[in-house]
């Protein structure tokens, strides 16, 4: 077990180093900005001259300053500070947001996490529906047809939802207007988590909480339906495969109770399949959340990435890509370690039947 975990950690570190090198190659070849360590504050003519002289330095020196940052002097205080540095999470200055990339990404990340957390409960219901569909094949055809009809890309589903509800004016699509923010006093709202729904409850503002739900219900619904379909398909396929196995036929032939078969054989197999597929499901969730945010102009990482790409703010785009790549690799490593530690093979039908006969 230790050897398998060590191998997974080493493999993940090698892949992460490759991602870092690819992102450095993308930033070092920018025609106007150069390495973001020179652009960690608002660009000025002095910065341009500095970059022209530093461009001729060896590539390893540029990579070291890009990775760890470079020392400089603050023009306002005269103190020695460190500009940039990927290790510090700062790729440089975001032209589209007027801040450093780490500042703008930190502000938007909490809204993306809020959207994911609100979508998880409905997504989890897809696993229960998948199990029910596997055991009720004849009576559950309507849900199966619904699953097939909902197996469409997130952006198409989002457009359909927008078209269906745009005339009702019940929900807010896009960023919150300044007039609405002033009316609800959002600027004076104490921010504890950066999530509007949670902060509204912590501040004792039920009116702001209802407003936040109106603002998030459409992207949450779209993301939840897409995740529900994925979990439904994986769970139903795993349960159907277990029901058709020879072990189930042998157990039923011996007259074992159905609830014992489900508890001791089918559910462990479904859990193992879900654990193995959780990496794919997590990557699909990250992909869909960026698409949904860009579609609904929800103030998260997806909308920020679309805005930065439209304004050719490549440093912000690369900052978001670095964050997503790091989160994906960390999540993949945790899932693989969990599979090694917690994955339990289902009991054989002989041991289950022997245990059942012993109880009798």
Image (tube, rainbow, N blue to C red):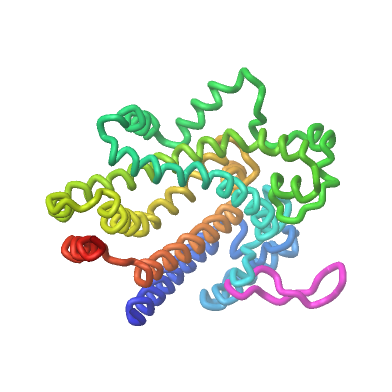
* Image position of 308 with respect to 61: above or below: above
Spot the residue most to the front. Answer: 360
Q: In the shown orientation, is residue 254 left or right of residue 264? A: left
Locate the C terminus and report the quarter of the image it occupies: bottom left
Residue 354 in which image quadrant: bottom left
Task: Name the residue at 67% across, 30% down.
Answer: 172
Residue 40 x, y percent position in the rendering: 69, 63
Can I make out residue 255 in this image? yes
**Magenta span has 74?**
yes
Spot the residue most to the bottom. Answer: 2
Can I make out residue 312 in this image? no
Residue 183 x, y percent position in the rendering: 84, 33
Task: Name the residue at 40% across, 73% down.
Answer: 14
Q: Nearer the viewer, residue 200 or 169?
A: 200
Residue 234 x, y percent position in the rendering: 33, 47
* Image position of 221 with respect to 127: above or below: above
Which range of residues does the magenta coloring cover?
67-84
Residue 282 x, y percent position in the rendering: 44, 53
Task: Name the residue at 75% across, 64% down.
Answer: 46
Task: Name the residue at 67% across, 62% down.
Answer: 39
**Magenta span has 275?**
no
Q: What is the number of callouts on the image?
A: 0
Locate the N terminus and report the quarter of the image it occupies: bottom left
């Amino acid at each position: 077990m230790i050897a398998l975990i060590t191998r997974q950690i080493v493999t993940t570190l090698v892949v992460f180093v490759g991602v870092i090198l690819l992102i450095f190659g993308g930033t070092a070849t920018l025609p106007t900005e150069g390495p973001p360590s020179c652009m960690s504050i608002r660009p000025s003519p002095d910065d341009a001259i500095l970059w022209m002289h530093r461009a001729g330095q060896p590539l390893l020196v540029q990579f070291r300053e890009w990775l760890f940052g470079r020392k400089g002097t603050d023009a306002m205080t005269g103190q020695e500070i460190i500009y940039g540095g990927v290790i510090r999470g700062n790729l440089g200055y975001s032209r589209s947001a007027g801040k450093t990339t780490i500042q703008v990404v930190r502000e938007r990340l909490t809204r993306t996490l809020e959207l994911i957390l609100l979508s998880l409960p409905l997504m989890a219901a897809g696993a229960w529906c998948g199990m029910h569909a596997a055991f009720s094949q004849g009576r559950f055809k309507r849900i199966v047809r619904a699953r097939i009809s909902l197996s469409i890309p997130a952006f198409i589903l989002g457009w359909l939802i927008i078209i269906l509800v745009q005339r009702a004016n019940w929900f807010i699509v896009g960023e919150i207007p300044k007039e609405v923010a002033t009316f609800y006093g959002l600027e004076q709202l104490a921010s504890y988590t950066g999530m509007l729904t949670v902060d509204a409850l912590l501040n004792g503002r039920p009116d702001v909480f209802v407003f936040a739900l109106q603002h998030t219900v459409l992207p949450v619904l779209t993301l939840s339906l897409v995740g529900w379909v994925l979990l439904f398909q994986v769970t139903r396929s795993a349960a159907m495969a277990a029901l058709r196995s020879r072990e189930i036929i042998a157990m039923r032939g011996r007259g074992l109770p159905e609830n014992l078969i489900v508890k001791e054989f089918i559910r462990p197999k479904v859990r193992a399949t879900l654990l193995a597929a959780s990496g794919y499901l997590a990557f699909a969730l990250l992909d869909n959340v960026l698409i949904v945010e860009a579609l609904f102009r929800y103030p998260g990482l997806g909308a920020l990435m679309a805005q930065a790409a439209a304004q050719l703010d490549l440093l912000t785009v690369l900052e978001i890509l670095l964050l997503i790549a790091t989160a994906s690799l960390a999540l993949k490593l945790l899932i693989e370690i969990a599979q090694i530690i917690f994955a339990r093979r289902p009991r054989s039908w002989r041991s289950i039947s022997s245990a059942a006969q012993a109880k009798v």
